[in-house]
């Protein structure tokens, strides 16, 4: 009898070749000149879905979108069986050799057990691991006990307008008992982790103006409130001396960290401490002193100044008194915080503390994204834990991610339960030069998805 697990192991070499074929396609959704490449990849994926035995597959582009999604379905388990929706994205960030790549960014290179290529970890790893898991099930002697939908997004890296419009217009097409979002990373090569919380996000831009144009600092300095200085004075009043956000109303809807959270996050702390030392390597940690590192990174909201510019920044000196200065700010949010309300508080505070000697414009960015907290005791999470334990040989730990995955909130509209299965590593340098993936994570990811489908079918039977 052929099991999906045995099939996957027997076909590892072919799976890897097909993975590399997809990696060679420059699916850069942020650059219009690569629209044809993205469309070609969509057709390639649609054909693969049909080749592996899915009942149907189509490429979908809504009027609001720029890059297509691919939707495949297999309904062989019957009308009474549960449905699992698997989400991944196949578009990638731009990459050039000049960015610092040691190899050609879109020519897969294998060295020391790692595969180097743009998209290798974010997120064609997940696309191929999940498609090959579905193939393994559909090639087995006994089919899965769940119906399957696989949706592959083509513009996750550039706005997600297409899939958001599709869900808004046709939510029933993605309706499922469980949505499995496959993206992101686990804690360590030998320690899988389950993300049960994601922070939301809100963003704005602050511009400070004073003189009508750049001025000679010798002629006018001392009579004009320098916009860069005024902006720095405003930004300095957004936090207190402990690192807490000093904006009135910012914490109004923030719940206390629960005992369950503390117990779960304690297991993560050693890994995050080691990763902080390796990746951040700052002189010392900073932030709210009453909260541990995992709590600061996932269970508490933040306000970050992402960029500041104004005046002259070229080589040498230019004695200019600048006309304006600008800062970009983002807030990472926790459950129950509403992005629009947070922005209202922030705008009101900036306007209240702005000096009368300058004019200030605050431009909120739309839309934000709400935070998500998933049920650690639900069927989906239990199935995910079993899937990791099967593939990695150890039980996963639970973490609350500091990042935001907006599609999670959208999936909660069409599925009863949502879970996130990640197979990459932060050391894979997603979005950066020399992006890579441990090949063992690809193979383990295939096995984990196979197990996830099996466990959901058994629990829902």
Image (tube, grey):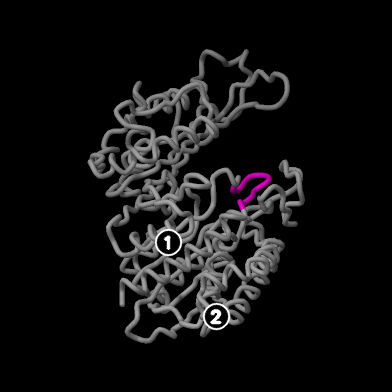
Mark 1, Cα crowd under 10 Å, few <14 / some 14-19 / many 20+, is many
**What residue do we see at 65% from left, 27% from top?**
313
Outermost front residue = 1
Extent of the magenta region: 430-438
Give the secondary structure at mark 1: helix
* Front residue of this view, candidates 162 and 232: 162
Prevailing SS of the magenta stretch: loop
**Residue pointed to by mark 1:** 387
* Residue 139 marker: 2
Residue 379 lies in what quarter of the image?
Answer: bottom left
Check residue 437 for magenta coloring: yes
Residue 442 lies in what quarter of the image?
Answer: bottom right
The picture places residue 150, in percent across and down from the top left corner, at 49, 72
**What residue do we see at 73% from left, 53% from top?**
109
The picture places residue 333, in percent across and down from the top left corner, at 36, 44
Asked if 428 appears above or below 380 in the picture, the reply is: above
Check residue 241 for magenta coloring: no
Would residue 224 be found to the left or right of residue 296 on screen?
right
């Amino acid at each position: 009898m052929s099991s999906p697990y045995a099939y996957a192991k027997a076909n590892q070499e072919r799976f890897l070749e097909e993975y590399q074929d997809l990696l060679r396609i420059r699916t850069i959704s942020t650059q219009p000149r690569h629209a044809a490449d993205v469309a070609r990849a969509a057709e390639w994926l649609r054909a693969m879905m049909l080749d592996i035995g899915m009942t149907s597959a189509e490429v979908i582009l809504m009027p609001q979108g720029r890059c297509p999604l691919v939707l495949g379905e297999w309904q062989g388990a019957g009308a009474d069986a549960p449905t699992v929706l698997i989400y991944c994205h196949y578009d990638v960030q731009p990459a050039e050799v000049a960015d610092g790549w040691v190899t050609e960014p879109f020519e897969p290179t294998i060295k020391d057990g790692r595969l180097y290529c743009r998209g290798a970890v974010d997120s064609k790893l997940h696309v191929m691991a999940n498609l090959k898991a579905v193939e393994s099930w559909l090639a087995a002697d006994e089919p899965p006990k769940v119906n399957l939908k696989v949706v592959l997004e083509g513009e996750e890296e550039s706005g997600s307008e297409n899939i958001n419009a599709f869900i808004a217009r046709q939510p029933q097409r993605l309706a499922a008992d469980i949505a499995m979002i496959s993206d992101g990373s686990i804690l360590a090569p030998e320690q899988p982790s389950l993300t049960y919380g994601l922070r939301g996000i809100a963003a704005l831009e602050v511009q400070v103006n004073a003189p009508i144009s750049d001025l000679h600092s010798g002629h006018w300095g001392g009579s004009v409130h320098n916009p860069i200085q005024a902006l720095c004075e405003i930004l300095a009043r957004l936090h207190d001396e402990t690192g807490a956000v000093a904006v009135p109303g910012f914490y109004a809807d923030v719940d206390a960290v629960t005992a369950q959270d503390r117990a779960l996050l304690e297991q993560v702390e050693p890994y995050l401490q080691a990763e902080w030392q390796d990746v951040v390597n700052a002189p010392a940690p900073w932030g709210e002193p009453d909260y541990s590192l995992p709590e600061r990174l996932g269970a508490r909201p933040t306000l970050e100044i992402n960029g500041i510019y104004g005046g002259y920044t070229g080589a040498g000196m230019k004695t200019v008194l600048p006309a304006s200065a600008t800062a970009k700010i983002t807030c990472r949010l926790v459950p129950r915080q509403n992005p629009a309300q947070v922005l209202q508080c922030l705008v009101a505070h900036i306007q209240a503390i702005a000096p009368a000697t300058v004019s200030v414009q605050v431009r909120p960015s739309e839309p934000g994204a709400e935070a998500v907290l998933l049920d650690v005791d639900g069927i989906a999470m239990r199935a995910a834990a079993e899937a990791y334990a099967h593939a990695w040989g150890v039980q996963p730990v639970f973490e609350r991610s500091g990042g935001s995955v907006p599609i999670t909130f959208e999936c909660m509209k069409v599925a009863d339960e949502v879970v996130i299965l990640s197979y990459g590593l932060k050391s894979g340098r997603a979005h950066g030069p020399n992006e890579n993936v441990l090949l063992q994570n690809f193979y383990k990811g295939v096995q984990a998805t196979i197990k996830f489908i099996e466990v959901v079918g058994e629990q829902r039977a």
